[in-house]
Amino acid sequence: MTLNKRAFSLIFPIVLLGYVLAGGLAYYGYRAAVIGLQKARLDQEVFQLKSSYADYLSLGSRLLYVVRNSNAFLLFLNETDETYRTRALAVGIQDSLQSLDPRDDTFVSCSIFQPDGRLVFHSDNGQDPFSTAGERQRAFARAVIADEAPTRSALIVENDGLSYLLMSSLVQARTARQPVLSQREQAVLLQIAIRPVHFQALRTGLEAEYRTRIETSATPLAPNGELSAVVRLAPDLYARLTPPGSYLNGRFRKIAIISAAMSLSLSVASIGVLMVLVRRFVTGPVEELDRQVSGIMTQQRETIDVPGTGEVGRLAANVRRLHWELDQALKRTQRLYETDPVTGIGNRIYFNEMMERFFHEEKTTGQPVTMLFIDLDNFKMVNDEYGHRAGDALLEAVAHALVLALNETARACDAAPGIAARFAGDEFAVLVQAGPRTAYVQDLVRSILALFQGGFSVDGSRYPVTASIGVASAPEDATTTMLLLSCADHAMYHAKGSGRNTVAFHGDLPAFAWTGKSPRNR
């Protein structure tokens, strides 16, 4: 069999299969992208639905609060003249509605129910002077009274087909406050009803667009398929929108036909071109590409030369780009692996790697290594009193100040800057290639302590935070990385016990027996 026939028998099924797979992957990729975009759009639309409902829920809560705490409502509860108290409350409620300035198209009503569920008052901002609470509103009020829930909300549909958002609260008859258990039988129910016009318009529009109804439930709902959106409208109200399967089928069917036709056409065209150019543009370039890739794998080359155009050239370009992307991804992963997410400086993993490197240089060049173990005093108080956001901002500011002090001191002393890292929690560590009694280390310690003189300032706020610093070095205090950590930790705790915002050099402390544990655990 000739090389051309052999190439044809090998290449034709592979190319055909490749384009079929590519078309299939393109189809499923397109399908996944369309579903993803549609899912994002669906999530955004149901989020708008939730936002609209939340606006009405907030309006209802505010109305409920204003009416319940108004003098007119208290007068209604304590006045015996039914005609007078009803008129006074109606005027007070109208004033309350105007004070909150709801939108002109928002229908709002206020109803009061006796403990037996009887409606004793109703007022709304509608045009009908004889309007009253609907049957579903009355049923909800009776359910709240029977359930003895202090406050509840619900979305109901009245017999006339209109939706209402109900906010109900039990109120003690004399004090207008939430009743205790022993006063439930004497409590009245204050109920606010809002007609959520904008919410209902959004809901109707979504149902028309997706040709399905939006499900609501008092219990949590799970997504019903890959194209389904669930949202929590209220603590006890959930909604789910699931378009029917036919919603996207037409679009998928069209792209499937196009993908199949393109795969077949490209396969036939590629085979014709490949059979003409196989001798010149396949054998030689493939061998050259193999040689270059092998050189990269054995670290004899750093990049791949693209041998012109054609399939092999594209393959070489893709391999080169893939190699570059993998190299960049590895570097990014390495940076993320060694960077503290809160402060942006090195983390403990980075610090340990640099300490191993410094120790290796100390063994080979005799350059001493000094570690500053820094613990922030009163940091827990900052977290407890000002919150974790303030604590994180403080840690970030301290980290940047440490790096700046380290670099400025190194420049002033004409020395290598060393490294700074967040060790754990409110602990930082600095590592320099200098002896502990050198001007470099002494100036660096003074610079760090000066940062905390009178507390530490972050964005105009000063926090009562100081620093306790423990200093240890190798080979003077330790011959291993673990022992250096323990010695610096020991010195730091000695500084903390000596009044805080001070420094302790391990070489000045009484000797201690190292057990492999941090002094905090002994």
Image (cartoon, rainbow, N blue to C red):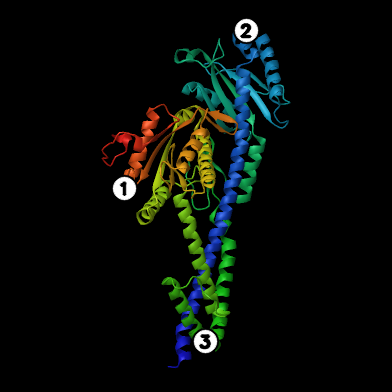
Which is in the foreground here, disc 2 or disc 1? 1
Residue of label 2: 79
- Does the rendering let one see residue 218? no
Q: Which residue type carries mark 3?
A: Val
- Secondary structure beneath dot 2 equals loop
Q: Where is residue 509 in the image (x, y as percent from the top left)?
A: 33, 34
180 or 245, which is in the foreground? 180
Q: Distance between the residues labelled 2 and 1?
A: 88 Å
Q: Which mark is residue 479?
A: 1
Give the percent coordinates (x, y) of residue 94: 70, 20
The residue sitting at 63% across, 48% down in the picture is 208
| Mark 1 Cα shell of 10 Å, populated few (<14), some (14-19), many (≥20) | some
**Which is nearer the N-term, disc 3 or disc 1?**
3
Q: Is mark 1 on a helix, strand or loop?
A: loop
Cα gap from disc 3 to disc 2, whole angstroms: 102 Å
Closer to us: 348 or 65: 348
Residue at 32 percent across and 38 percent down: it is 518
Name the residue type under label 1.
Thr
107 vs 13, left or right, is right
On the rendered image, what quadrant is the N terminus found in? Answer: bottom left
Kindly identify which residue carries mark 3. 278
Please name the amino acid that badge 2 sits on. Answer: Glu
Label 3, label 1: how far apart the Cα atoms are: 65 Å
Q: Is residue 437 among the parts visible in the rendering?
A: yes
